[in-house]
Image (tube, rainbow, N blue to C red):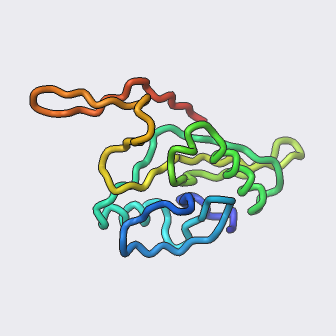
Amino acid sequence: MSVKNTSGIVFIREHTLLPAGLSIESDAYLPGWRTVRNLDGYGLSREIEEAKWTFFYLAGDICSMAFGREGSGTLRNAVKRVLAKQGGERFNSLEITKVVSKWFFVIPYTRITAHFRHIQEHIGLVDPGDDSLWRITSSPNRETLVQQHPASITGC
């Protein structure tokens, strides 16, 4: 994968359930992760929504930096660092939103900004195996999903 024009690249965890009829061309990128070849984040979101599924975009930038010359190896190391960050194991997709390659004196580095994303059939972002973050409160007229602990959002 070329480092040029990498904004919008989406990575999907292997064995993620996808809508029937959705054709995605992908390549192996990291162990357990594939990169979508034929669609960017916007195009994939549109295709998933047409199938009546949801492609969540989680707020908050996730940044990572890797030392090395501009190239696919440096980008791969930066993506690997993002995927290793807290919370990444709960989501099945990642979208790169910005890639910047610079030099610090004589040391080259690449900095990426990304967002975790999640593909699922249901409209509410609920992890059935983890009820520590969410609870359902009932009132006479409706049930409401309430977040028990606010998520921390960090900037880059």
At horizontal 51% and vertical 28% (from top left) the residue drawn is 152
**Left or right: 135 in relation to 111:** left
Q: Residue furthest left?
A: 141
- Report which quarter residue 10 is drawn in: bottom right
Q: Which residue lies furthest to the top in this view?
A: 149
- Report which quarter residue 139 is drawn in: top left
* Location of residue 112 in the rendering, given as x and y in whole percent from the top left corner: 65, 48
Image quadrant containing the N terminus: bottom right
At horizontal 63% and vertical 40% (from top left) the residue drawn is 85
At horizontal 49% and vertical 69% (from top left) the residue drawn is 39
**Left or right: 73 in relation to 48:** right
**Left or right: 91 in relation to 108:** left
Q: Nearer the viewer, residue 41 or 104?
A: 41
* Location of residue 156 in the rendering, given as x and y in whole percent from the top left corner: 61, 36
* Location of residue 151 in the rendering, given as x and y in whole percent from the top left corner: 47, 29
From what the image shows, is residue 150 above or below residue 108?
Answer: above
